[in-house]
Image (tube, coloured by chain):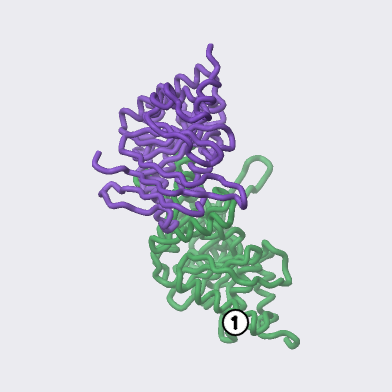
Amino acid sequence: MTGYTFAYLDEQTKRMIRRALLKAVAIPGYQVPFSSREMPMPYGWGTGGVQVTAACLTPEDRLKVIDQGADDTTNAVSIRSFFRKVAGVATTEATAEATIIQTRHRIPETPLAEGQILVFQVPIPEPLRFLEPRETETRKMHALADYGLMHVRLYEDIARHGAITRAYAYPVQVEGRYVMDPSPIPKFDNPKLHRSPALMLFGAGREQRIYALPPYTEVRSLDFEDYPFEPTKAGHACALCGDDASYLDEVIVDDAGGRMFVCSDTDHCRSRRAAGRRGTMAAPFEDAAA
Amino acid sequence: MSAPILQVRGLTKRYGARIGCAEVGFDLWPGEVMGVVGESGSGKSTLLACLSGHLAPDAGSVVWRRRDGAPVETLALPERDRRALMRSDWAFVHQNPRDGLRMGVTAGGNIGERLMARGARHYGAIRAAAADWLARVEIDPGRIDEAPRAFSGGMQQRLQIARALVTAPRLVFMDEPTGGLDVSVQARLLDLLRGLVRDLGLSAIVVTHDLAVVRLLAQRLMVMKDGRVVEAGLTDQVLDDPRHAYTQLLVSSVLQV
């Protein structure tokens, strides 16, 4: 496509973002300000992630985009076609084949490998946002590692509900230093952040912040000694592929309270079905029909 | 009792041309409670804010003696150390409990905050400490999971005291701790404070306009007028035999029932 610089953003902007990314990688978990650009999509649709992806893309890359684990939702499809058009890069839905994966709210089930880059779309990068309203104060708290308040929130959860009820955007501490919002991924995915072989980059477009986890970074979910962190998921197996270890979406199927649980990671589910695994509600003759 | 825990010299704070407090100096000894009295606008609260690090004074020094005996110039402390001091060895009790409490957080969470800020990570232990302190300030430990806004004014003030004292501070700053409470609640609170100060061996600086409060709590008294200390000495001495004309006026203005 002509009339655009490679990957839409002009070279100076990509350079500025790369500098922010380098700083973010150098200080894991620290929120680096960057001058976020207007993108041809609304805030909340992943403008931060798109800018980070654009700054990282090379013509040889193979891009995968997921939204809540799915490759086929509006957000994922439109961002994938956006980069196919403005960067001309190859795209894929297979996690293992991708070199860059832009994601919203999930980490793929397939373990990531060295050399892969996972780009998160982040709505609110500040983990202390709803505890301390002043941004000047939260910056000071980060600078001084003054994180007692974060535990007050967890304490309140246990006092009121008997357990830490926070199920997504569960705060983590990086290398024993910065407390970080891992973007709204389910806490089921938090352990995948810890010592991941892939590079993880976080972009918040509206809030103009970039942060990162270099490969093999220590990431600990905050908890109490007597109420340890527990990754949770629905206690079912996927109705299509039968996997009982993957993260599940609940789907209402009729007006009579009927529901099914399916893998939120569509690529994971499809590859399992392709390998012959079947859940309780899988189409009986799928192979023949296809 | 070998050395004063707080030495203040020449503390001055100006608001433009006006004086907040000027040339204030005193020593505070371990286990001693000092009262600061004066009318509104006399610089009491400015002095307290400067001492506790909430305001930066224009001149003077505040030297704090640490547990290991080493003196520290608190005004020159980096922010990190000053905050660490404020949540361990020092505590502040505000006049209005709303300023000192998190109103949306339960009583237990309020008391536990300082513990968690210091690194306590055992929920059961934090909760036990919170329940213990609720009992010590005469609040039913069964109300540990209620938010402060469900408490009466007197209970909120006692909760604030529990929150401040849970880390066993050595110095407590109190700004009108009984202000805005009715007299019977005031009396109970003073009783409680007196017991706590004696049992824990706290040092305290109590700012108030209420002479009855200092009579009950403080061993030593400073009288301030227009930002300056006009008279200082043992509480009973100052109140029974005031020398300065302003102190005489202050003492004679107290309503007798």
| Badge 1 amino acid | Arg
Q: Nearer the viewer, residue A67 or B250?
A: B250
- A10 is higher (above) or lower (below) than B125: below
Tell me the crowding category of disc 1: few under 14, some 14 to 19, or many 20 or more residues within 10 angstroms, Cα based.
few
Task: State the residue position of label 1.
Answer: A15
In which quadrant of the rendered view does residue A202 lie? bottom right
Is disc 1 placed on a helix, strand or loop? helix
Q: Write the residue at 48% across / 54% down.
A: B59
From the rendered image, report the letter of the chain displayed in purple: B
Residue B142's x, y, as percent? 44, 25
* Residue A234 visible somewhere in the drawing: no
**Chain ID, mark 1:** A
Residue A188's x, y, as percent? 47, 55
* Residue B247 visible somewhere in the drawing: yes
Instruction: Name chain A's colour.
Output: green
Q: Nearer the viewer, residue A259 or B39?
A: B39
Residue A232's x, y, as percent? 46, 50
Residue B201's x, y, as percent? 31, 33
In which quadrant of the rendered view does residue A282 lie? bottom right
A87 with respect to A237 (left or right): right
Q: Write the residue at 31% across / 52% down.
A: B71
Return the residue found at the far bottom. A2
In which quadrant of the rendered view does residue A69 lie? bottom right
